[in-house]
Image: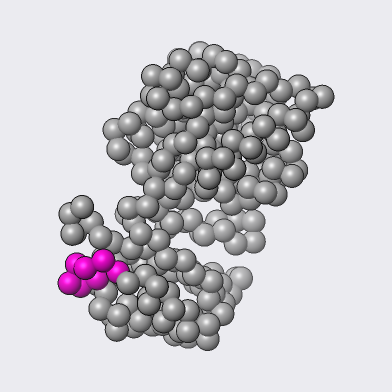
């Protein structure tokens, strides 16, 4: 590995008070670290402070993570700080769930295969067999678990068994057209990302793009969010939007929406993996790339 790539990400949040930036930056300087990227935000309404620092050891040696964590824990304790240290080259284990629509899955697999999505995709799970050949082409295990209202508990038990077996750290719903149970939502809170279309005004139910066409919408978009019990209303990570006009028929709107969905989901996963997302009070603080 190139020595220059030996970087680490320190993320932390705590009650807002004087000295919160200093406790991080001073410690990194004293530990012989060079900060390459720094983001912070003070939520004055909720009195909460958030900070993300990317750094490397000044002599480019690997970081003594045990010593770093032990020493920083002492400094952070005085600020009631919740924090995490991650090597920037760490690739979390991911499982993707999908139904029949393949646009988001295709996009993620391409980014993964070309090295542009820093994750380790361990499995693909679907309630339909349609996309098995796509998974096989990418040499990723594919699990087909059909589901009905009557078999939902058994199907989710099968899903959870795969998540446990693969050591899944992030669950991605890439147009998985089923609602997760309350138990699954609680178990994967903050660790499951979903994508859905965003149309203004909102159109729920069947054929949303036909409804949008009939209303003459001028914007189509997508929302990527963490899964919650409230359908499509979990903490938002990122959103995308494209303008359209009267020349877009329902099929055109759907194609445009699929493009936005794919890009928005990939961006949300990237932000999550890069530790740019902080969850607090059912909403997010996101340090986007500049």
Q: Position of residue 284 (x, y in %)?
A: 55, 56
What is the magenta range?
56-63
Q: Nearer the viewer, residue 222 or 214?
A: 222
x 59%, y 51%: residue:
190
Q: Residue furthest front?
A: 165
x 67%, y 49%: residue:
187
Q: Nearer the viewer, residue 267 or 215?
A: 267
x 17%, y 72%: residue:
59
Q: Nearer the viewer, residue 78 or 159?
A: 159
For the C terminus, give its image quadrant: bottom left
x 44%, y 47%: residue:
92
Q: Position of residue 115 (x, y in %)?
A: 30, 38
SS majority, magenta: loop
Quick check: 280 above or below 129? below
Q: Position of residue 50 (x, y in %)?
A: 48, 69
Q: Quadrant of residue 147?
A: top right
* Residue 134 seen in this snapshot: yes
Q: Quadrant of residue 223?
A: top right
Total marks shown come to 0
As for residue 59 lying within the magenta part, the answer is yes
Quick check: 238 above or below 23? above
Quick check: 206 above or below 96? above
Q: Position of residue 110 (x, y in %)?
A: 35, 28
Q: Residue furthest right?
A: 150
Q: How is the model colour-coded? A: one colour
Question: In the figure, is residue 198 to the left or right of 3?
Answer: right
Q: Nearer the viewer, residue 239 or 92?
A: 92
* Residue 17 seen in this snapshot: no
């Amino acid at each position: 590995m190139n020595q220059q790539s030996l970087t680490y990400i320190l993320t932390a949040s705590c009650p807002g008070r004087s000295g919160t930036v200093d406790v991080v930056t001073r410690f990194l300087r004293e530990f012989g670290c060079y900060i390459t990227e720094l983001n912070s935000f003070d939520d004055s309404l909720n009195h909460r402070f958030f900070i993300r620092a990317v750094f490397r050891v000044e002599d480019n040696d690997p970081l003594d993570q045990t010593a770093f964590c032990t020493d920083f824990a002492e400094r952070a304790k005085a600020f009631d700080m919740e924090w995490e240290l991650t090597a920037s080259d760490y690739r979390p284990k991911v499982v993707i769930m999908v139904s029949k629509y393949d646009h988001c899955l295709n996009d993620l697999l391409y980014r993964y295969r070309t090295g542009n999505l820093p994750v380790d995709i361990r499995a693909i799970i679907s309630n339909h067999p349609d996309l098995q050949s796509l998974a096989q082409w990418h040499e990723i295990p594919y699990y087909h678990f059909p589901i009905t209202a009557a078999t939902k508990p058994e199907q989710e038990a099968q899903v959870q068994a795969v998540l446990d077996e693969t050591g899944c750290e992030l669950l991605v719903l890439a147009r998985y057209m089923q609602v997760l149970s309350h138990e699954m939502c609680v178990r994967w809170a903050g660790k499951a990302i979903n994508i859905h279309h965003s149309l203004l005004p909102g159109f729920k139910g069947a054929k949303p793009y036909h409804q949008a066409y009939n209303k003459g919408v001028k914007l189509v978009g997508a929302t990527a969010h963490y899964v919650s019990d409230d359908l499509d209303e979990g903490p938002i990570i990122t959103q995308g939007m494209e303008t359209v006009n009267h020349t877009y028929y329902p099929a055109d709107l759907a194609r445009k929406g699929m493009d936005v969905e794919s890009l928005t989901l990939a961006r949300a996963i990237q932000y999550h993996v890069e530790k740019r997302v902080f969850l607090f009070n059912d909403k997010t603080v996101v340090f986007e790339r500049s």
